[in-house]
Image (cartoon, grey):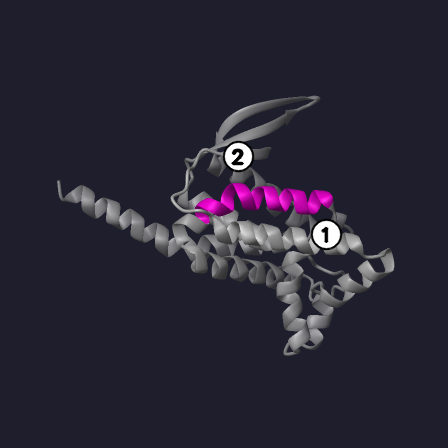
Amino acid sequence: MIPLRDDNPTRRFPIVTIVLILLNVAVFAYEHSLSPEALQAFFSKWAFVASSFTTEPTSIHQLATVFAAMFMHAGWVHIGGNMLYLWIFGNNVEDRLGRLPFLAFYLACGTAGVAAQAFVSPGSSIPTLGASGAIAGVLGAYALLFPRASVLTLIPIFFFFEIARVPAFIVIGFWFVLQLASGVASIDPTLAQAGGIAYFSHIGGFAVGLALVLPLWLSSRFARRTRGGRY
């Protein structure tokens, strides 16, 4: 299922979401300005590498790669999919959390995603890059805060495509089940790093996104029940 847009209006202009998208696009444009050799050197220097980080966990440069890697992408499909999900779901989460809290939330989920992947593969020398962990956190938050929001979705059925409105919890739940199944499969040494996708980064970011907005969700439910009990 490929989300196209949601029917969930916001109250405020999503400036942080847009700035994050522009930063990701700007870094991707810079990557494309480099020669293949310079691009490889750029990835080697600024992408997160678990084996390097575990060797020097207090190094300023290694800590910087945790955040730098969130704005780097390996190709058009990689950045296109990530930015589509960020645009559709990020604006509502930003609207609910507030601008600066949303930025902190985004970076925390991205950090959690990197940490989850490093925990599973601490000796990996394969660079981890992309906003997927942070965006997975956004999806987790959206699924909890707006489960019944309607998402216009492109659904491939064999050689045909169907466009339908699907509840957000189904769209995001389907995505998470795929990540979880792929992540479990990648634990097998013969399948590890399959396709170069850091599935546990997605899983870790999603779980932390859920956890961070859980207090807000609980407080809003308590407030609704309290108001309801007054009548």
Please name the amino acid that badge 2 sits on: Arg
Earlier sequence position, callout 1 versus callout 2: 2
Q: In the figure, is residue 52 to the left or right of 17?
A: right
Circle 1: element type? helix
- Position of residue 120 measured from the top left corner of the image (x, y, whole percent): 65, 61
In this rendered view, identify the residue nearer to me: 58 or 79.
79
The residue labelled by disc 1 is: 29
Q: In the figure, is residue 39 to the left or right of 26?
A: right
Q: Which residues make up the magenta segment?
A: 76-93
Q: Is residue 54 visible?
A: yes
**What is the number of the mark on residue 109?**
none
Circle 2: element type? strand
Q: Bin the neighbour count of mark 1 within 10 Å (Cα to Cα): few under 14, some 14-19, many 20 and up.
A: few
- Position of residue 22 measured from the top left corner of the image (x, y, whole percent): 61, 51
Q: Residue at x 56, y 55 (%)?
A: 134
- Position of residue 205 measured from the top left corner of the image (x, y, whole percent): 55, 55
Q: Residue at x 81, y 64 (%)?
A: 41
Q: In which quadrant is the N terminus drawn?
A: top right
Q: In the figure, is residue 59 to the left or right of 196?
A: left
Q: Check the image and report above or below for 193 versus 142.
A: below
Please name the amino acid that badge 1 sits on: Ala
The residue labelled by disc 2 is: 5
In this rendered view, identify the residue nearer to me: 42 or 217.
42
Q: Check the image and report above or below for 64 versus 134.
A: below
Q: Is residue 203 visible?
A: no
Q: CA distance from mark 1 to mark 2?
A: 25 Å
In this rendered view, identify the residue nearer to me: 125 or 90.
90
Q: In which quadrant is the C terminus drawn?
A: top left
Q: Is residue 10 magenta?
A: no
